[in-house]
Amino acid sequence: MNKQKRRAVIAGNWKMNMTPSQAVEAVKETAKLTAGAKSCDVVLCVPFVDIAAAAAAAEGTNVKIGAQNVHFEAKGAFTGEISASMLLEAGAEYVIIGHSERRAYFGETDETVNLRTKAALAAGLKVILCLGEVLSERQSGITSEIVSMQTKLDLAGVSAEDMKNVIIAYEPVWAIGTGLTATPEQAEEVCAVIRGVLSELYGKETADGVTVQYGGSMNDANAAELLAKEDVDGGLIGGASLVPEKFAKIVGAAEA
Ligand code: PGA
């Protein structure tokens, strides 16, 4: 069993929800309800404009703040984009990269995901790298091939040393926001495939140390059985992270 070698991480992805003042309240409430978490890191990935207020509200608590995207250039004429150094200075420690909503609605490709990942790591951010198959790929029986390819392309040029700051979030696209959670067996199977690819790329010791999350309609009712699986080390939580009580219960399940 190698699960003990890895840190459990429960991360919330607020998506485009919460104004700065709402964020302050939600961070404070989440911090209060998860204050007892010891073996699990608690992260909230918030909209860009909420980062500074959320980071201030999280100070002195065990809640860490992340962003939901980052641009790969350091600065310049990229209207509407945000750089890694801007995120760090605003108070973000983590950043989600390659979320399926960005891939589907904003033209994100494995190439840009890879560029963003390398830029974020070089700047000192911790990366939550999202990947996963769409329904037609699962139905065609090519889930393993798809996630293996994404893992390799998205991590091209990322060193074994840098992998200490990378979390992989396996998020089957058909499970996101749909209420259709993967079964614990489906989640375990694919998280284990991802770890196998990491082992190929970086060796077993590095692969055994990487936190691999499951995401996609994880909630307070189904978290415990998903998190009990050997290769499922945490969760990336959308809808349920907007309700501190629900999110705290998921953190509690990761602690158990
Ligand atoms: P969900 O979202 O928990 O609402 O399905 C997960 C995610 O998009 O990261």
Image (cartoon, rainbow, N blue to C red):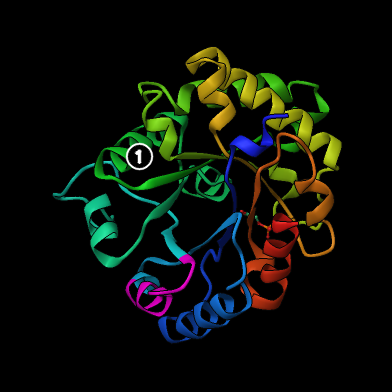
Residue 136 position, x and y percent, is: 76, 32
Residue 244: x %, y % from top left: 64, 76
Question: For the magenta stretch, what is the residue range?
Answer: 52-63
Reply yes or no: does residue 53 show up in magenta: yes
Q: Amino acid at mark 1?
A: Arg
Residue at point 80%, 45% (across, down): 228
Whether residue 80 is visible: no
Nearest the eye: 161 or 182: 161
Q: Which residue is mark 1?
A: 116
Residue closest to the eye, 202 or 143: 202
Quadrant in which the C terminus is drawn: bottom right
Which secondary structure lies at badge 1? helix
Q: Residue at x 67, y 30 (%)?
A: 2
Corner quadrant of residue 11: bottom right
Residue 224 can be seen in this image:
yes
Which residue is at 29% across, 45% downward?
A: 124
Q: Is residue 233 above or below residue 80?
A: above
Task: Please tell me whether residue 51 belongs to the stretch shown in magenta.
Answer: no
Relative height, residue 40 to residue 21 (above, below): above
